[in-house]
Structures are given as structure tokens and as C-alpha cells.
Image: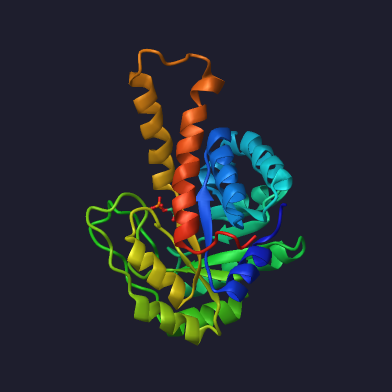
Amino acid sequence: MLVNLKYVLNLAEKGGFCIPAFNVYNMETVMGVIKAAEEMKAPIIMQVYPRLMKEETGYYLSPIILAAAEKATVPVCFHLDHGPSELETTRSLRYGATGIMLDGSTLPFEENIALTKRVVDTCKFVDVQVEGELGHIGTTKDDELDEFTTADDAKKFVEETGVACLAVAVGTAHGRYKKPPKLDIERIKAIREATNNTALVLHGGSGVPDEEIKAAVKAGVRKMNFATDICYAFLDCCLEELQKPERTVAVDNFMKKPIEAVKDFCITRIKLVGADGKA
Ligand code: 13P
């Protein structure tokens, strides 16, 4: 069942759990994610990086995501991840996205507010809600983390933009960590309190220790992103299969195991964030 961002966030808020947001890249990763969600009876988000919406990939991938979501027996939101401008956000709406992220985190504070609010207002016309980002969440290749989000800034940002959820910088980064991150759980609690319990989003979920993830969910994280570990689950399995002398060359048959590998990984995260059985 295809639903919008507000729908899954409301489920998470009411149930005190977190919606896992899985980045997908091709039909096989979509299939792995959907199989996991259905098996676990979990509401989920499937999201795509903006580069896919710039390239022709988005044109082909969006109908696959929509078909999977509409056929699914669980609620699925189709979300744009890290939309940098109105080009990607508008194109994603046209491709059928039911959730949009506008990432203005590298802009000056007031410009981030203005652009995010403009996208929120446009998306409202088609009943789609927006995720904003405040405090830039970088990559694990950066020398050090950017400044963390403050509760006061978050309060002003949420009030002025009307975002449905907010990605915050509290210790995570995108990619494979050199050493496991330590999250600022007290800051997550303070931001929640200052923003009238706005749903908070944790980016860079791959490689965050399980106990940190559980504490973050308890503190008010309602959406958590996993991308890098989906890629590794898929590619490691492909590499392993390629070593086998009896491997098949029929691509559809070859892909069956990598699809299962993605499914198995997603099941572990669905359980960890408490989304199993919540559909
Ligand atoms: P990882 O690739 O570190 O899992 O981060 C995913 C993410 O936050 C996508 O926006």
C-alpha cells in the first residue's frame, strides 16, 4: 500500500518506534526491501538519492518502486533522499514520490528555512510531506563532523518551515565508519522537547552500534536511514556468487541470492528499530 510520509511517521509516533528508510538503487534492491517489509509486517520507507532523479535511472526506477509499494500488504512511502533543489523535488513529485527531503543544510540558516518552506508549501498541494535537514550530516570520509544541531535552531526551523520531520546532526555520518560512532542522545532528547516532539531523522544508519540505535529510537528518532549496508549486502553476495564455478549466467537467476541478502539485512534493521509487526 503506497502511503505518504505523514502516514508512516504517525504510525511510528503512536507506537513509539522508528520507520526504517532503505535506499534503493535498482529493481533487485527494491525486491529485497519489499520482501523484508512484508515478511516482518513492517511499515517502511523506500528512498532514492537525488542523483538517480537527475539521471535516467529515476525514470525507470520510480515505476518499479511504485508498483512494489502498491502491491505490498504493508504501508510503503516512496521518498526522495537529500533533494538539493526544486529541480529534484519537483521531478520526484512528478515521478510519484510521496515523501520529499529538501536538504538545505549547507545553506545559511535563513536560506535553508526559506527554501525548505517553499518546498513544504508546494508539496502540500499534493498531500506530500517534507523532511528538512539542519546541521550538516557529512560523510565518514570528512576529517571531522560538522557542528551538531542545537535545540534552539531546531525549534525555529520547525516552526517556520512546517516540516514533518527533521534530520539532525548528532554524531552520525554517511558511509562506513572507521570507528563506531557515539551518538549525542541527550541532544536528541533536547531537540525533541524544544520542537514539540517533532519526528527526528537519523542519517548514516549503517554501522551504528545496535545499542546506540535503540537509545536513539527511545529518545525520539522516528526515521532512520540505511544505504551503505544495503549496497554491501548486495555486492558482497554478488562477489561471493561469482567465485562459484557452478554459477549461473542467467542474470535473473543469478540475482536471486543478492535479493535474499538485501532482504536478510533489512530484516535485522526492521527488528532493531522496533518496526516489526507494526503494519
Ligand atoms: P549510510 O549510507 O551511512 O547508511 O547513510 C544512509 C543515509 O543516511 C542516506 O541518506
The image quadrant where one finds the C terminus is bottom right
In the image, is residue 78 above or below residue 210?
above
Expressed as whole percent of the image width and height from the top left, the position of residue 257 reads: 47, 30
Residue 143 point in image, percent of width and height: 23, 57
User: Which percent across, then down, holds residue 169?
Assistant: 39, 69
Q: Is residue 54 visible?
A: no
Q: Please indicate whether residue 189 sits to the left or right of residue 91 in the image.
A: left
- Colour convention: rainbow
Nearer to us in this view, 106 or 222: 222
Number of numbered markers: 0
User: Above or below — where is 41 with respect to 212?
Assistant: above
Residue 62 visible: yes
Q: Please say if 198 is above or below 77.
A: below
Q: Residue at x 53, y 43 (%)?
A: 24
Residue 242 placed where, x, y %? 37, 20
Q: Nearer the viewer, residue 63 or 265?
A: 265
Closer to the camera, 153 or 265?
265
Q: Residue at x 27, y 51 (%)?
A: 141
